Each structure stands twice: as structure tokens, then as C-alpha cells.
Amino acid sequence: MPVLHKRKSKDSYYVLTSINGQVVTFQLTAEGHRYLREVGIVTKKPFGRFLLLDLYRKGYAFTGHGGIDVIPGQGILDFPNDPEPETMFPSCAACSSPEDLHLVEIKDHKHYASILCRACRAKDLSRIDTSIPLPFVTRAVLDRLMIMKGISEADKAVLTLQDLLNAEFSEKWAALAEARGRKPVQEALIDEKSLDRLV
């Protein structure tokens, strides 16, 4: 299960979790930390993966290429019986890394959508036409890209992303807030469906 941590040098937070056997750091935006705080999540205690998945889906949690050094004994990471499996997180189609991912349009003998990390994008530059950082990709943006660029195929990494974007976690957030005697966080002011008009 993911664990919330506070940076010593700044008033900001990050989450450590395990994906494919490696520890991954998710940076949190202020909004992401607010969501966790509102449902009673505290530092150094494990919490449900669905919360991190939903923050990631909304763009409030993201990976970078730097990360934070992991100190041995930093806490429990990921119980095997977590109901939301780590495979729900998108990863690079080429190397399975969850770091610094982009949705890319591949134009070669085959035209399709994929997800690649920074290193794999650098190796494949000649075949990449469009590249969008994953935190900016919503259901509407993904659908619009596929239509605008005439992309009819998507690899397994993109299908995983579609599953995540289609997942509905709002009921779980509300149940957790209610169980802890807290008010649910206010809904976003901008409707996710209208975000594609901003791009």
C-alpha cells in the first residue's frame, strides 16, 4: 500500500509505493495532499491504493525522473492483498518503467498509440509524432487525440491507461470520508469532460 511522506526541507508531500518490485515516488500537488488530508490520511501510515490511483488519474500525483532516495526501514509498502493491483498504474510499453511517462503517437509501418518513458522516447524519436505528458491526459484528451490523428490502434499500455481513466473512485472517497467522520472534498471547478477544449 502507498505511504504518505513529508519532505523535511519543504512544506510538500510525496507518496512511496511499490510497482513491479521497485519503489516509486509520486510527487503530490497541494490539491493532492488536500484530498488525502480531508479523508484523514496521515504521514507514515499506509493507505488504500485507490486513493493514489485516483490522484494520479486526476493529475494530482505524478512521477518524475529524479525521485527521492529511499532510506531502509521507511515503512510498509504495498500489501499483497491490496484490492487495487499495482498493474492499474500505467507503465512504459517498452521497459515497464512508471517514471516520466508520455502518451505517444507512433508512426512507422504501423500507426498506433503507446506510452513511453523518457529513456525509451529518446531511443524512438524518429518514430514519434505526438508526445503528451501523462498527467495532462484525460479521457477526453485521449479520445480526441485518437480521432484527430486517425489512430485506430493502441497497445496494452494505453489500454491500461484507458481502464484507469474509466475507473470511478468517487464512491470509495466518500465512504472513506464518512467512515472517518469528515466531509468529502469539494468537486473540481472545471469538469473533466471540458478539459479537452483547453488543449
Image (tube, rainbow, N blue to C red):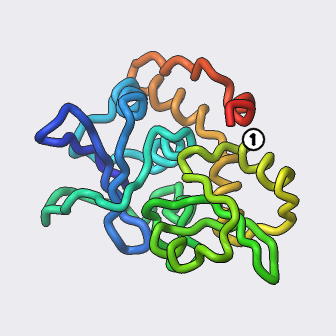
Residue name at image x 19 percent, y 61 percent = 69
Residue 195 as seen in the image, left or right of residue 40: right
Give left or right: position of 73 versus 152. left
Q: Position of residue 128 (x, y in %)?
A: 66, 69
Instruction: Give the residue at the far front of this rendering.
Output: 126
Name the residue rendered at 65%, 40% in the picture.
168
Of 67 and 17, nearer the camera is: 67
Q: Secondary structure at mark 1?
A: helix
Horizontally, residue 109 falls left or right of residue 82, namely: right
Residue 7 image offset from top left, x and y in percent? 18, 42
Q: Looking at the picture, how far across and down is residue 131, in whole percent? A: 62, 58
Q: Is residue 150 left or right of residue 157?
A: right
To which residue does mark 1 refer? Answer: 140
Q: Name the quadrant containing residue 14.
A: top left
Q: Residues within 10 Å of mark 1 (few under 14, many from 20)?
A: some
Rendered location of residue 34, percent (x, y):
37, 26
Tell me which amino acid carries mark 1: Ala
Q: Say which quadrant the N terminus sits in.
A: bottom left
Q: Residue furthest bottom?
A: 109
Question: Residue at point 35% right, 71% down?
Answer: 22
Instruction: Tell me the quarter of the picture where residue 31 sits.
Output: top left
Q: Residue at x 38, y 35 (%)?
A: 29
Which residue is at the front of the view, 43 or 79? 43
Q: Quadrant of the C terminus?
A: top right
